[in-house]
Amino acid sequence: MRHRSFGKAAAFLVSTMALMAAAPSLADPVRYDVMANGETVGWLVVDRDGQEVAIDYHVDNNGRGPKHREEVTLDADAYPVSWTIKGTSLFGAAIDESFVREGHTVRWVSQADRGEMPVSQGRLYVANDASPYSLALYANALKQAEGQAADAVPGGRISLAAVQDVALDGGRLTGTVYRLTGLNLAPGYVVLDQAGELLGDLGGVIRADLAADAPRLQQLRSELETRRIRDIQARHAQRFDAPVRLRNVRVFDPETGQLSPLSEVTVFENRITTILPESGGAARADAYEIDGQGGTLVPGLHDMHAHNSIQSSLNYLMAGVTSTRDMGNDNARLLQLTQQIEDGELPGPRIVRSGMLEGRSPYSVRTGIVADTLDEAFEALRWYADRGYWQVKIYNSLHPEWVAPVAAEAKRLGMGVTGHVPAFVTPDQALAAGYDEISHINQLMLGWLLEEGEDSRTPLRLTGMARGATLDMDSDRVQRTIEAMAAGNMALDVTAVTLETLMMSRAGEVPPMAAAFIDHMPIGYQRYRRRAFVDINTPEADAAYRGGFAKILETIKRLHDRGITLLPGTDDTLGLTVHREIELFTLAGLTPAEALKAATLTPEVYMGRDENLGRVARGALADFFLIPGDPTQDINAIRNIRLVMKDGVAYQPPHIYPEMGIKPFAEPVVITPPTQKPDGSDSETPSALFGPEGLDGHHHYH
């Protein structure tokens, strides 16, 4: 690290000596392991001398990861006085971030923004590209702040709460778990010792000598988040003991692409029971009443490329996404989460599970199951099949010669086959070997853009998409693949929004994918999105990426016109990006109604569930959402969600979003309770209108 200053004030030396006594040899660098799925994928080395902290952060997971160095100077209250970060971000974009406090002013420059403000408005800088060690820095500053909360630079407010103590190293060491809120959509968790030194976080970073405790800390995060979101569920999920009649609504029919005349839709328990023309009559005494005010009921949306988590489950419901297909996860956690949602313990979408299968290589992703031999791959397939996984998802490092036997064994076991196209395999070869679909439009198009021998396990699978600007869509190479997909009735899991995020984001600018909702988000999310993800440092590179993305949209339209099934997905956890994926389908040339069908009914037909899901119809499961406006005329109308119903349970995003740090997009509905008890006698509840708080301040309509 840079030159150490040993001539500090006596008070500061006393503080430093106390820290050194409580933490492992702070005179020497402290190493932390970065872990994923039980394997070490990087390191975090902290070299601290009093106020001076140098951090080396390096992650290499799935062929990518941030790699940078930080230097921080702290004041006597543990607030940063200066902070520099230099290196590369997740996909290789250059980082050159700095913050400095001089006198009564703070100044900063990052990928996202630059500016200055008076110290009186905030002095706790929240870095844009910091390592996980930043959580320890924030926590130590907030421990001394009034109310353990402080205004942040460049905006927002961060708060700290001690959650619980945790024993580590076989009980020989005790740490305290702290929760930080206000940084982003989900809280951050950090474990500190008594001197405030980092022992680990709950996301996979842990001091190297404590690595054996990493799985337990990650499980603790799951438990804490389960507790937090279970509480939101208890306060906001609205269950009904009588029919629910939604009046004055139009119903979107994905088969015809049309809206119905004004109608009344009744739900009882978890099914849609009647759909009738709007009567305009008086409210029913035996039903809960919701006036839709001329809005539209849309069948629940799908994210066909999800990686579900406890946090994402609530995000999805608030965005009207009532079903997801999980495309690779920590299998134990996914099985647990699925059960918790099905039991009603946690809010969340219906989850269809696809099991990720990866081969061993220096580029292996650590999600799902990594196989070292073909026999291990077969064993993984049996594990997935025995637990009801719908598909296997093949990943980048599966050995080319294994693709055909893996696909054949998966189908023998009753599972479908999807995935990335492994390195040194072409999409045509993967389809011929037994794929039913391909995950990600770039995985399809790379077959037209890469040369033989180029390695798609590296970031080339993303950066290579810039070559698409000059792609001839009428070439034999392209047409051969499209015709093979059409002949084999194969599908594409598109995830166009993921490619847009990577190819169209520019440092300091609001990316197109987030333009419609970024102002509603917490400051940490806003800054994270105003950044580049790949290195675009010349006008030529900028033009190539823009041209490449335009060719992605053209490919979507070509595939659609050829009758190939397009499945919208995000590879994200936000929920709101599903809306942008649907919007991108319209920018590619599909009508709004066609794009909505792709996100509602088409996935259910593809997965064989369309008898019960994918449409608002008598007898179907009650999965839908209510919006003002007509989405067949303006696809952006799907963002303004007032009410979501999943399996007959209602949620009002306008009331829940503020608890997530998000500004609502629409007004809530008003629910009128029945004036008659389920047995036909008069209810003691007055017939006056009431909102989601109910008359007793709770959300329990039993």
Image: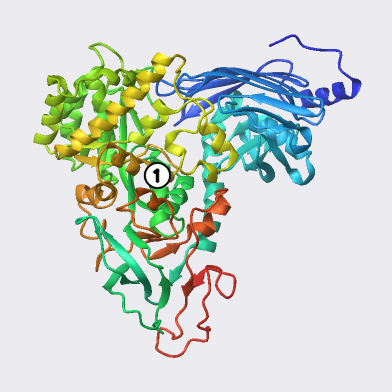
Quadrant in which residue 309 is drawn:
top left
Query: Residue 456 appears at what percent x and percent y?
Result: 31, 19
Q: Is residue 58 above or below residue 673?
A: above
Quadrant occupied by the N terminus = top right
Whether residue 9 appears in this view of the structure is yes
Nearest the eye: 622 or 387: 622
Give the total of numbered labels: 1
Asked whether, in this view, residue 493 is left or right of residue 173, the answer is left
Mark 1: amino acid: Leu
At x 57%, y 53%, the residue is: 658
**Residue 361 in the image: x percent, y percent?**
35, 18
The residue depicted at 46 percent of the width and 33 percent of the height is: 511
**In the displayed image of the protein, which residue is found farthest to the right?**
10
| Residue 669 on image: x %, y % | 47, 66
Direction bottom: furthest residue? 681
Q: Most extreme residue toward the left, as rendered? A: 487
* Scheme of image coloration: rainbow
Does residue 458 sit above or below 153 in this rendering? above
Q: Is residue 437 above or below residue 424?
A: below
Q: Residue at x 16, y 27 (%)?
A: 404
Viewer-nearest residue: 116 or 151: 116
| Residue under the image location 44 percent in, 54 percent down | 640
Crowding around mark 1 (Cα neighbors within 10 Å: few <14, some 14 to 19, many 20+) is some
Left or right, residue 636 beside residue 387: right
What is the quadrant of residue 308 in the picture? top left
Residue 292, quarter of the rendered image: bottom left
As rendered, which of 448 and 309 lies closer to the eye? 448
Name the residue furthest front: 633
The residue at which mark 1 appears reads as 334
- Whether residue 269 is visible here, answered yes or no, is no
Callout 1 secondary element:
helix
Where does the image place residue 144, in percent across and percent down from the top left?
79, 38
